[in-house]
Image (cartoon, rainbow, N blue to C red):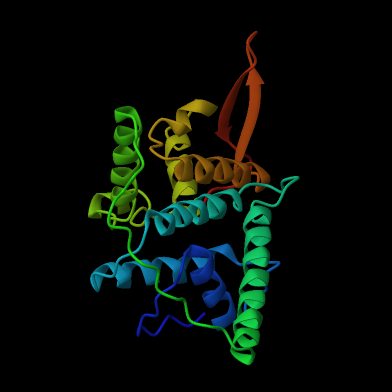
Amino acid sequence: MERLTFKLPVFEGPLDLLLHLISKHKLDICDIPIAELLEQYMAYLDEASRMDMEFTSAFLEMASRLVQMKSAMLLPKQEKDPREELVTALLAYQTCKTLAALLAVRRQEHFVRAPQPLPRAQTYRLRHRPAELAEAFVLARGKAKAKQPPTADTFSGVVVRAAASVTTRVLHVMRRLARGGGQRFRTVFADVSSRSEAVATFLAVLELVRAGRVQATAEGDDEILLLRRGTVKWE
């Protein structure tokens, strides 16, 4: 998947950006390769932040959702596709854009009178209770804050953090078991600091058991799950 060439367009929202990336790289909207799409999405946000472009927190929320979907795709087969909700939203947004473009064309085909100026009222005759004025002020102040661009701290933990590698966690588990004896299953998660690392560690244990390099047995009255070196020779 080629990288974006940055003469950055301005998008109305994260769905608009995702549709642009899907169209640009000819991706199947019903079977989205989340890892590739996430890479392009993060590249846009990174470049936009360097160019001091303003974009709302909705873009950061979508980045977080894509990272979560990528982690979920590493898990064994699930009943519900983690991408289903995103695909539904994209298809609906794509339909709205198509209809909006059609309406714009039809609007140009018909005469539309320009808005007529109204005389400005010189006297405001309505009366309001103090509580209503206070509520209106709080509401207006909240909307003003929502329009402010996100700070650099907003990106931490969403844009910078990389997904853990299953290969790295395989080496971690093998090193723990190389000391000899059995290791409790939960001990291989002792140094896990994120959900991505926990998923990668679990997949690493499954892969080692499947390959015969690790044996998993339940022992004791409490049937505690222990991991030991398997019968297949370690390289």
Kindly indicate the quadrant of the structure image that contains residue 129: top left
Q: Is residue 8 visible?
A: yes
At horizontal 31% and vertical 36% (from top left) the residue drawn is 133
Across and down, in percent, residue 24 comes to 54, 82
Kindly indicate the quadrant of the structure image that contains residue 58: bottom left
In depth, the one of 58 and 128 nearer the eye is 128
Residue with the most extreme top position: 221
Left or right of 177 on screen, residue 208: right
At horizontal 38% and vertical 37% (from top left) the residue drawn is 193
Across and down, in percent, residue 44 comes to 39, 71
At horizontal 35% and vertical 85% (from top left) the residue drawn is 7
In depth, the one of 1 and 147 nearer the eye is 147
The relative height of residue 62 versus residue 78 in the rendered view (above or below) is: below
Left or right of 13 on screen, residue 220: right
Across and down, in percent, residue 93 comes to 62, 66
At horizontal 47% and vertical 33% (from top left) the residue drawn is 188
Across and down, in percent, residue 153 comes to 25, 49
Q: Is residue 156 visible?
A: no
